Image (cartoon, rainbow, N blue to C red):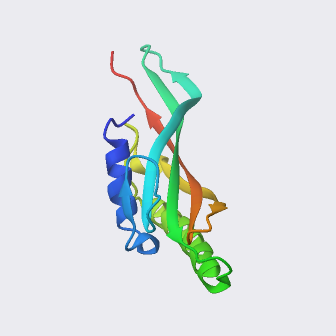
Amino acid sequence: MNENALAELLAFLSGAPALAGVALRAEDAGPAPDTGGLWPRGVRVLQRREDVAGGVTLRCRAEFLLRLCLPLPPGDGVQAARNAGRLLALQAWVAAESAACRAPVFGTGLPQSESLRAEDGRLERADTGGTARYSLTLRAEYEWTPQP
């Protein structure tokens, strides 16, 4: 896997229109509004292929958790809808960028063999102080050929 994947994913997400004005970093979000945190949750090998020369290619899935702390005054349904719309817009943007091969490269295979998805966007909790924490999962599938 690309050792710079976390930094590249942060830079990629910083360009998302839905995250305009959100300060992202490689850690937990908040508690200040308009902050976000991203960190890896692990890599799973989905498939292992060996060629006739003994070389191995792995199909992997890396998972990341993105948490956002956004403004949400108590009882403000308009802001709640705006925040939910941001999550939906971010998920759609990630899908479009991945389909156009503009997402970060995670593996050693062809860029067309990779995919990045943003899924499961949800409200985790709303605080009486006027902020709410949202999360979504980013999943990257890619091929990686380990070097001996």
Q: Quadrant of residue 87?
A: bottom right
Residue 112 in view of the camera: yes
Q: Residue 23 placed where, x, y %?
A: 36, 63
Q: Quadrant of residue 78?
A: bottom right
Q: What residue appears at the point 51 percent right and 53 percent down from the top-left corner?
A: 66
- Quarter of the image for residue 76 reads bottom right
Q: Is residue 102 something that shows in the picture?
A: no
Q: Residue furthest bottom?
A: 78
Q: Position of residue 129 (x, y in %)?
A: 56, 69
Which residue is nearer to you in this view: 123 or 140?
123
Residue 15 at x, y = what percent? Answer: 35, 67
Residue drawn at 52 percent across, 55 percent down:
67
Q: Quadrant of the C terminus?
A: top left
Q: Nearer the viewer, residue 137 or 57?
A: 137
Please give left or right for residue 96 compared with residue 103 in the image. Answer: right
Q: Residue at x 49, y 69 (%)?
A: 93
Report the front residue among 113 and 70: 70
Residue occupying image coordinates x 61% and y 64%: 127
Total numbered circles: 0
Q: Is residue 113 above or below residue 14?
A: above
Quarter of the image where the N terminus is located: top left
Relative to 126, is 2 on the left or the right?
left
Tell me: residue 142, above or below residue 148. below
Measuring from the top left, give residue 136's x and y in whole percent.
58, 56
Viewer-proximal residue, 57 or 130? 130
